[in-house]
């Protein structure tokens, strides 16, 4: 057994399940010679392992040695496949035997058993030959560091602004070009190209410019699109819109995207960055340029490209040629990365010696920042002179310098040197990235899952595989093999094109990225990704040519149904570890999926699968199963509990919300990291005890039907330290008094780990909350929700939850009192539907958001000295604002403490009061920015002028006597005004800052104004007017402010006519649900109009149709660029 274990450790660190080794020994002990072959294989592998690192370093200039290394890898891969397959079959046999009364020994079919023994002998012979051949190369014994990330002295290094040197002058020049008016041309958008070879930092320079405050203040909107190889107009338009709106767009037509983008760009001074442009086809660029002309004069497009020709084609100005970084700047960058803070601790002699060597290394980087960063990362934290000299004189420099080919070659040599000095565990991880296209966005956690599937990660000590994988990624990041995508955030990463070229060059032939049916894989290929539009043919070719394939990815997604091809793939490619079929049109998974016994990663996201076959549950090695966006999938296979290695089961939140029943025995999945829901049952396999050993659960866990929990403590939630959020839910039922003690006990035994951040308790039937909530058991809790806890009459929470920031209380029908506690951390409080609640704690010292709704026994608010937002809705007897003067200690101008007083509600900036009939006045001292008052009969006065100086938004309801509207003042700060339930418009104050007026729900309003006092013309700065849901409004012929830019008329069922006299600035007109409106104004619409929408106005829509020669009103609107008018479908009579 020890011999086998050493073999498996040496052959790519295969991890065989417990007991499988005993089965191998028992199975093959009767076959003569097998144990000797295994013993011999182990010894040979030990010898080869000691020299393989030296061989990999020396193979660059030695074709024979390179071929020998390839043979070693091929033989090791084959041995790994053989032993892992046997272990998987043994595991499956064990599972089946557990259900049999008299289990049989694991012998398998005789032919299979002897065939496996023969393969072991064959592999042993191959390694005999390999071991003999190694002697001709005189290889040295070099030990690898065992898969541990190298310790870095300065672990804070990232590629961000602070690590950019020598480009300040370039940045200022580009910003000046963006801001200067000399490049403006009428009817043309200014395009500024930045060109230079790969690795010079064109993208970094563009990012520095893009994120500069002067640029963001001058341009709006700003957009960033990475183009890379293909100049796809539809994708570019979509990404521009998505970047601007921060919302994902579904697939739509190019013409629709063009209309959307016109709305975004029209009249706006925008900045667009097109990064990494390659196309030299001027016709493709022309289609985009026409659209960009919609922007305001002064708009700019910044283009980065390696190609000078691209700059000549797209640029309206000469290209800004980015030069190599000066040597001194390169040295500064190299020194910062390689030495960091450690440089200050060195002796002057040591520092001078390292600087002399380092400057020589920097010279060979030829002014390329990417290469400098790579070399600096290679020597990061090392101060050994020999190490620096080794890098300086490494033979790869000479090899590359002797080749007079393109510039890239020397750069690739520099990057290859960095790769050669990676530990073996990082080399494999880096090579794997060649499977993804250029500009691919990497997410750390997702990439680590793929590395795990390939067996690249071995957890050491207490670290999990995930933690070790993140450490691997971080080390590659620090060595500049990855770089942060600073346009988005530090959660996304990409790989420089040259780094991707490097990964591609060194990973062949094991890795192959297939484009447009250009097959280049061979029998030695073990990892493939398919990027072309047709993937079925490459898949069939893989089955025929590369049966030992381990990875098949479709990173770009393909809308294709593979039909029977999948069955052929599954039956042939039995060594697969990673399979990505996401975004394909497959509707069902063949039962033959069970043949992929070694599969660890399966992505079926965004497919049309409706049901997973139960045979998928035979994949005992499966670690990750992704089913995101599978909208037709509604259940999981019944034998899901067999997947004992499963770590990630990824489905949308909506799936878990709709799922009524989990498969039984989910508690077997002790490695699972996520289980969003668990429904407690009283049947075997559904008990709450299933959660006991699932100690790796993280994120959110929602436990429902807790009334069925018999032994709640068996869930051992207090051992699940990675859970961030817990939801405890009981079903909606009647809880009798005699059952309250049982409910109390269940919740008491559900005590979570102290790391918990969020807790929700729903429909709990106990009469008190557990001790772990009241006595300091949740020191890290930041959010608490209590909903439908009907039996609790007293709440005693606050001082024992020192980090609680948010508290939501709803539907606690019998809650009478919240005892006086200190709530020093609470910032948000929402109380809703607590009809018996009479008392709150007297003061909430730092609360800044308070909402109270339907608390009909509450008379007074608490003291809230730092409150900013206050919302009060349907509180029938609330009458006391509880305003007091707060005594505060502040520092005076001399820095000395002094005591001062201020009103407790003076910080309130937003107040909304709806249906609180007992409130007689607004607070005496507050300065709101936003004020809304509805249904409060006794509130008849607005804030006095000195408290309304910063009022920006005001919403008033005049349903009683209109006194509030008449009391309206004229603060110059008021931008937005909403008035509802008025009989006629009031006499308007001056309101010089008013930009938007909303008139709505005025059931008795017949005219907008019948007096000059109420004329809207007095609002001379108004830009938007909305009139909505005015049931009796018949005409709209009043004069409107000439400043108006947008007019909305909606849900006015009696409106028959309107006029738009003298509105030279009107650009947008929206008319909706005005069914009696018969025509547009006789004198037409303003020439300034850019957008017209007519919906649910059948009479008017008919007159505005273009078809059939055009309706009567079509000539009035045909000049408008953007029209949205209902298409009328003629009715057919039977």
Image (spheres, rainbow, N blue to C red):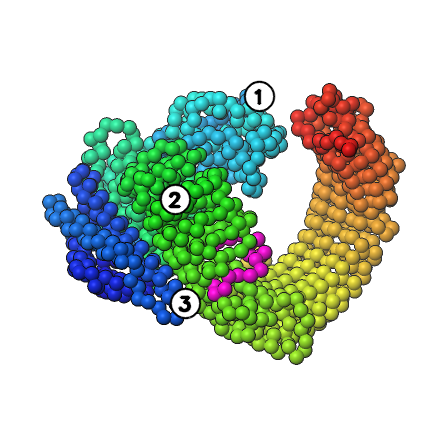
Residue in view at x 17 percent, y 51 percent: 125
911 and 635: which is toward the camera: 635
Mark 1 or mark 3, which is nearer to you? Answer: 3
Indicate whether residue 655 is drawn in magenta. Answer: yes
Q: CA distance from mark 2 to mark 3?
A: 31 Å
Q: CA distance from mark 2 to mark 1?
A: 58 Å
Indicate whether residue 308 is drawn in magenta. Answer: no
Residue in view at x 57 percent, y 21 percent: 187
Can you tell which mark lies on residue 187? Answer: 1
| Residue 342 in sight here | no
Q: Residue furthest front?
A: 110
Residue 968 rendering spot, x and y as whole percentages: 80, 46
User: Which one is earlier in the sequence, the residue at label 2 or at label 1?
Assistant: 1
Q: Quick one: quadrant of the N terminus?
A: bottom left
Q: Is residue 1004 left or right of residue 111?
A: right
Q: Which residue is label 2 attached to?
A: 568
- Circle 2/circle 1 CB separation < 8 Å: no
Tell me the crowding category of disc 3: few under 14, some 14 to 19, or many 20 or more residues within 10 angstroms, Cα based: few
Q: Quadrant of residue 1101?
A: top right
Give the residues drawn in magenta, as a range.
Answer: 646-666
Q: Is residue 960 left or right of residue 1043?
A: right
Q: Determine whether the residue tagged by mark 3 lies in a helix, strand or loop.
A: loop
Q: Determine whether the residue tagged by mark 1 lies in a helix, strand or loop.
A: loop
Q: Determine whether the residue tagged by mark 2 lies in a helix, strand or loop.
A: helix
Q: Which residue is label 3 attached to?
A: 99
Residue in view at x 80 percent, y 31 percent: 1099
- Circle 2/circle 3 CB separation < 8 Å: no
């Amino acid at each position: 057994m020890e011999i086998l274990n050493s073999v498996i450790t040496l052959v790519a660190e295969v991890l065989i399940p417990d007991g499988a080794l005993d089965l191998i020994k028992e199975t093959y002990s009767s076959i003569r010679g097998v144990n000797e072959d295994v013993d011999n294989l182990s010894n040979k592998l030990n010898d080869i392992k000691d020299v393989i690192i030296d061989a990999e370093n020396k193979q660059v200039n030695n074709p024979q040695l390179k071929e020998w290394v390839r043979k070693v890898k091929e033989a090791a891969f084959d041995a790994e496949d053989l032993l892992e397959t046997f272990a998987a079959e043994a595991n499956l046999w064990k599972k089946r035997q557990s259900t049999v009364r008299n289990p049989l020994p694991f012998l398998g079919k005789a032919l299979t058993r002897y065939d496996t023994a023969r393969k072991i002998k064959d592999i042993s012979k191959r390694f005999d030959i390999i071991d003999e051949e190694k002697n001709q190369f005189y290889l040295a014994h070099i030990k690898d560091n065992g898969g541990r990330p190298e310790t870095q002295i300065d672990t804070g290094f990232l590629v961000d602004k602070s690590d950019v040197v020598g480009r300040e002058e370039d940045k200022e020049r580009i910003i000046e070009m963006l801001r200067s008016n000399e490049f403006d041309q009428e009817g043309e958008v200014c395009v500024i190209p930045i060109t230079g070879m790969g690795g010079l930092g064109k993208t970094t320079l563009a990012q520095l410019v893009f994120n500069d405050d002067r640029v963001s203040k001058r341009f709006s909107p700003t957009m960033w699109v990475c183009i890379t190889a293909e100049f796809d107009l539809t994708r570019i338009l979509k990404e521009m819109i998505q970047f601007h709106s921060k919302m994902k767009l579904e697939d739509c037509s190019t013409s629709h995207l063009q209309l959307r983008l016109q709305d975004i760009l029209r009249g706006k001074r925008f900045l667009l960055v097109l990064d990494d442009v390659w196309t030299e086809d001027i016709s493709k660029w022309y289609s985009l340029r026409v659209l960009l002309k919609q922007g305001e004069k002064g708009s700019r497009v910044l283009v980065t490209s390696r190609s000078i020709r691209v700059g000549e084609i797209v640029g309206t100005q000469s290209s800004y040629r980015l030069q190599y970084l000066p040597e001194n700047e390169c040295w500064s960058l190299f020194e910062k990365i390689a030495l960091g803070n450690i440089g200050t601790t060195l002796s002057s002699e040591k520092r001078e010696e390292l600087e002399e060597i380092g400057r020589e290394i920097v010279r060979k980087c030829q002014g390329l920042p990417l290469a400098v960063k790579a070399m600096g990362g290679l020597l990061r934290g090392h101060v050994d002179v020999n190490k620096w000299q080794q890098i300086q004189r490494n033979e790869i420099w000479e090899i590359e310098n002797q080749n007079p080919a393109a510039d890239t070659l020397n750069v690739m040599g520099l990057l290859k040197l960095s790769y050669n000095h990676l530990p073996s565990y990082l080399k494999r991880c880096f090579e794997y990235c060649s499977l993804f296209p250029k500009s691919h966005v990497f997410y750390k956690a997702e990439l680590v899952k793929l590395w795990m599937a390939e067996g690249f990660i071995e957890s050491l000590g207490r670290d999990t595989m995930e933690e070790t994988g993140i450490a691997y990624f971080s080390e590659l990041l620090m060595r500049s093999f990855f770089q942060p995508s600073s346009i988005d955030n530090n959660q996304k990463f990409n790989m420089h094109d040259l780094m991707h070229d490097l990964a591609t060059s060194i990973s062949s032939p094991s890795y192959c990225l297939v484009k447009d049916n250009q097959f280049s894989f061979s029998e030695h290929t073990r990892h493939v990704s398919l990027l072309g539009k047709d993937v079925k043919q490459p898949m069939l070719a893989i089955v025929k040519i590369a049966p030992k394939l381990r990875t098949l990815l479709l990173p770009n997604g393909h809308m294709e149904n593979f039909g029977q091809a999948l069955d052929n793939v599954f039956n042939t490619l039995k060594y697969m570890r990673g399979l990505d079929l996401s975004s394909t049109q497959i509707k069902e998974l063949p039962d033959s999926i069970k043949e992929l016994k070694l599969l660890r990663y399966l992505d079926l996201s965004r497919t049309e699968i409706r049901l997973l076959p139960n045979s998928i549950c035979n994949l005992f090695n499966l670690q990750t199963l992704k089913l995101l966006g599978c909208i037709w999938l509604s259940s999981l296979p019944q034998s899901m509990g067999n997947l004992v290695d499963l770590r990630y089961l990824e489905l949308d939140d909506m799936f878990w919300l709709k799922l009524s029943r989990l498969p039984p025995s989910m508690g077997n999945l002790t490695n699972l990291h996520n289980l969003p829901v668990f429904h407690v049952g009283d049947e075997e396999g559904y008990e709450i005890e299933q959660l006991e050993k699932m100690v790796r659960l993280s994120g959110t866990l929602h436990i429902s039907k807790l009334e069925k929990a018999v032994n709640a403590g068996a869930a051992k939630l207090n051992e699940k330290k990675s859970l961030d959020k817990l939801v405890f839910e009981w079903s909606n039922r009647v809880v009798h008094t005699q059952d309250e003690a049982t409910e109390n006990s269940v919740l008491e035994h559900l005590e979570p780990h102290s790391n918990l951040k969020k807790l929700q308790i729903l429909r709990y039937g106990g009469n008190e909350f557990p001790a772990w909530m009241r006595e300091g058991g949740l020191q890290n809790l930041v959010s608490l929700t209590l909903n439908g806890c009907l039996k609790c009459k007293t709440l005693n929470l606050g001082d024992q939850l020192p980090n609680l920031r948010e508290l939501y209380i709803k539907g606690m029908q019998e809650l009478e009192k919240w005892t006086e506690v200190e709530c020093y951390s609470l910032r948000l409080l929402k109380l809703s539907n607590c009809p018996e609640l009479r008392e709150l704690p007297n003061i909430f010292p730092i609360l800044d958001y308070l909402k109270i709704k339907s608390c009909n026994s509450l008379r007074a608010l608490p003291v809230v000295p730092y409150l900013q937002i206050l919302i009060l809705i349907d509180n029938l007897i609330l009458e006391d604002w509880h305003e007091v003067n707060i005594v505060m200690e502040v520092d005076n101008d001399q820095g000395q403490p002094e005591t001062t007083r201020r009103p407790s509600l003076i910080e309130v900036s937003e107040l909304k009061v709806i249906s609180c009939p007992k409130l007689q006045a607004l607070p005496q001292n507050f300065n709101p920015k936003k004020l809304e008052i509805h249904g409060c009969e006794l509130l008849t006065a607005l804030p006095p002028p000195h408290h309304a100086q910063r009022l920006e938004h005001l919403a008033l309801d005049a349903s009683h006597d209109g006194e509030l509207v008449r009391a309206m003042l004229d603060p110059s700060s008021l931008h937005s005004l909403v008035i509802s339930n008025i009989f006629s418009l009031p006499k308007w104050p001056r309101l010089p800052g008013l930009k938007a007026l909303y008139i709505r729900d005025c059931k008795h309003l017949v005219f907008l104004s019948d007096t000059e006092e109420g004329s809207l013309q007095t609002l001379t700065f108004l830009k938007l007017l909305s009139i909505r849901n005015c049931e009796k409004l018949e005409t709209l012929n009043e004069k409107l402010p000439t400043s108006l830019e947008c007019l909305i008329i909606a849900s006015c069922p009696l409106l028959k006519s309107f006029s738009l006299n003298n509105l030279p600035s009107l650009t947008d007109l929206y008319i909706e649900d005005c069914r009696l409106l018969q025509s547009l104004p006789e004198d037409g619409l303003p020439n300034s109009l850019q957008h017209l929408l007519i919906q649910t106005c059948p009479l008017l829509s008919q007159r505005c149709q273009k078809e059939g020669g055009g309706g009567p009103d079509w000539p009035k609107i045909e000049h408008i660029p953007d029209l949205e008018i209902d298409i009328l479908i003629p009715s057919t009579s039977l």
